[in-house]
Amino acid sequence: MITRVTTPFSYSSAVVAGDYVFLGLHRGFGEKFTEQIHDTFFHLKNTLLEVDVPIHNIVKVNVYLKDIKDLPEMERFFCEYFDTDKFPARMTSTTDFIDSDCLMMIDGIAYKRLNSLNMI
């Protein structure tokens, strides 16, 4: 069975296929990078709650930054947000975005089955 968390756009925020949740793009809003990364994770958590998966079950993320200068702030955020021994696998790159106010986006994969076991 496949479950989708739809958006008004031509993509889903999440697609659950078997034991995996494939996360579509998530972005935050605000004028500063710090505001955007916190808002992004707020939306990411809400998407995962819709499919009954805690955020600590994220196993892989791709982070897209508009400016590589934001990498140290992103690193600090991940170190504060995730336990040291429970970081998701991650790829970080830079890119331009269609929306000029966008400073970062995240997509990724979460594992659904372990959510009730709290093993991750």
Image (cartoon, rainbow, N blue to C red):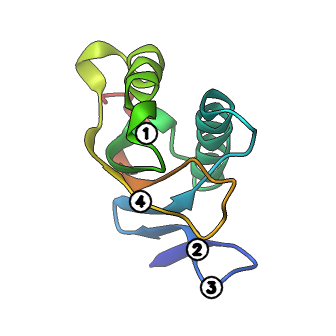
Residue under pointer 1: 115
Q: Residue at x 38, y 17 (%)?
A: 79
Question: In the rendered image, which quarter contains the C terminus?
Answer: top left
- Rendered image: mark on residue 95: 4
Hey, what amino acid is under mark 3?
Ser
Name the N-terminal-most of marks 3 and 4. Answer: 3
Image quadrant in which you'd find residue 5: bottom right
Residue, disc 2: 12
Residue 116 in the image, given as x and y percentages of width and height: 44, 37
Disc 3 to disc 4, C-alpha distance: 21 Å
Dot 2 or dot 4: first in sequence order is 2
Q: Is residue 77 left or right of residue 42?
A: left
| Three-letter residue code for mark 1 | Asn
For disc 1, the neighbor class at 10 Å (few under 14, some 14 to 19, many from 20) is: some
Residue nearest the viewer, comparing 72 with 105 = 72
- Which tag is nearer the camera, tag 1 or tag 4? 4
Going from the N terminus, do you reach mark 3 or mark 1 first? Answer: 3
Badge 3 vs badge 4, beta-carbon distance below 8 Å? no
